[in-house]
Image: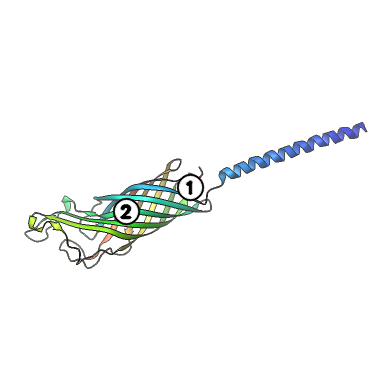
Amino acid sequence: MLVSMAKIRKFRGLLLALVSFLFTATHIYAQSYYVEQENTFYGGPVVGANFCQVDGDDYAGYYKTGLNVGGIVYTRFGQRFAGSLEILYSQKGSRGHKAQLANLTKEIEIRQYGISLDYAEIPIMIHIMDKRKSHIGVGLSYSQLVSLKESLTTNNPKYDDTVNISGYPFRRADVNLLVGFNLRLVKGLFFNVRYQYSLAPIRTDVNYDFSRAKQFNNLYVVRLVYLFGQKY
């Protein structure tokens, strides 16, 4: 009887230890699972600048700068893939540089030339992420033109004016191919560099003496992005 009671107490102790161990292990696993669980959706603000040129205006160089501001939302597809949608205010265009001045006629020399194009832009991209959440992506953007200006200054004040673009209007829509890289700096702060180019001309049949008939947006984008709701 004493031996039996001792065995019962020993078994009871082992059972209690086993239950305690299972409870602790389950609790730790649940905590670990909760910490590692990623949010499906997360996003934040975007602030940066475009460095632009218009291919076809015969003024090479990314001398035109403009704002690139708005917001971005990501959705995850597993551990390494994500998609993103942005809503942006994006300023594009070009600016003639003195090194590329050209003669409009034998008597008139162009001193300054510029195109300013303001868009509401919606980029959609697919990204591949590393363990630090830095990521590279490709995609497309649709832009709707909201305002524009084209200006010309020459050595003859008689011809200095905003260029009449009614004969060579810009298209209201601009679709761009995008390639970008996001480097995580600290917590949710990312440094973003992107290249984008128009898939179709932003205007055609241009008949200026100093430009080509078809023109395209061509730009680099440098931005800071802060993402809320992502686990690190």
In this rendered view, identify the residue nearer to me: 141 or 104. 141
Cα separation between marks 2 and 1: 28 Å
Question: Which residue is the site of mark 1?
Answer: 130
Q: At which x and y percent is residue 13?
A: 80, 34
Crowding near pointer 2: few (<14 within 10 Å), some, many (20+)?
Answer: many
Residue in the picture at 52% in, 49% down? 39
Q: What residue type is labelled 2?
A: Ser
Q: Is 67 left, or right, of 82 in this rendering?
A: left
In this rendered view, identify the residue nearer to me: 84 or 216. 84
Callout 1: helix, strand or loop?
loop
Residue in the picture at 60% in, 42% down? 32
Q: Which amino acid does label 1 sit on?
A: Asp
Q: Is 35 left, or right, of 24 in this rendering?
A: left
Q: At which x and y percent is residue 157?
A: 8, 55
Q: Which of the 4 image quadrants contains residue 209?
A: bottom left
Q: Single out the residue that lies furthest toward the right.
A: 1
Which label number is shown at residue 207?
Answer: none
Of the image marks 2 and 1, the number of the one nearer the N terminus? 2
Of tags 2 and 1, the one toward the viewer is 2
Callout 2: helix, strand or loop?
strand
